[in-house]
Image: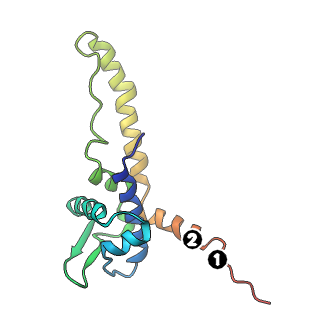
Amino acid sequence: MRISAKGRYGLAAMVELTWLSANGKLIPVATLSDHLGISKIYLEQIFSLLKRGKLVTSVKGAQGGYRLARDASEISVYDILSALEQTLFEPTESSVEEKAPTIESILNENVYDVLDQGVKDTLSKIKLSHLLDEYVSQKNKGNYMFYI
């Protein structure tokens, strides 16, 4: 499976947004851009799609920014990628339906549909809250203070 830059950056931005806005604070795109090293303009395009997908809310103005539209435990990787990659979860196009409809039907039922459902089920189980927990865990590794 090949996830586009938009999908990868969107996932990273959502994890960082979740981390920074833990107390409901609004996070400007410029802050996320600085933290992640992603173009501010590109992140604005990504957040426009995330907002359209009802995953984030925004407030305009000097004190504005983005925050999650609902709890991180209610947002899955599938939700995020669906908002960003409209074609990623479209049904597989038929390939031999005209000349070999039986083969096409067998492939759809036993390969394509099974694969599509498996990917959807797997990505739906991975919640943003889990990614945040992993992020915090990795971030805290090696940050021990030793005192004598």
> Mark on residue 120?
none
Number of numbered callouts drawn: 2
Q: Nearer the viewer, residue 61 or 91?
A: 61
- 13 w.r.t. 86: above or below: below
Q: Quadrant of the N terminus?
A: top left
> Mark on residue 143?
1
Residue drawn at x 69%, y 83% as measured from the top left: 145
Residue 96: percent from left, percent from top: 29, 15
Residue drawn at x 26%, y 65% as measured from the top left: 44
Residue 95: percent from left, percent from top: 29, 20
Q: CA distance from mark 1 to mark 2?
A: 8 Å
Name the residue at the bottom extreme.
148
Q: Kindly indicate the quadrant of the structure image that contains residue 18.
A: bottom left
| Residue 78 seen in this snapshot | no
Residue drawn at x 41%, y 50% as measured from the top left: 123
**Type of amino acid at the residue the image marks with label 1:** Asn
- Quick check: marks 1 and 2 in contact, CB under 8 Å? yes
**Type of amino acid at the residue the image marks with label 2:** Lys
Local SS, label 1: loop
Q: Is residue 76 left or right of residue 98?
A: right
Q: Kindly indicate the quadrant of the structure image that contains residue 30.
A: bottom left
Question: Which residue, given by chain and number where applicable, does mark 2 sit on?
Answer: 139
Q: Nearer the viewer, residue 87 or 97?
A: 87
Q: Nearer the viewer, residue 104 or 11?
A: 11
Q: Is residue 1 left or right of residue 69?
A: right
Q: Nearer the viewer, residue 60 or 114?
A: 60
Residue drawn at x 25%, y 60% as measured from the top left: 45
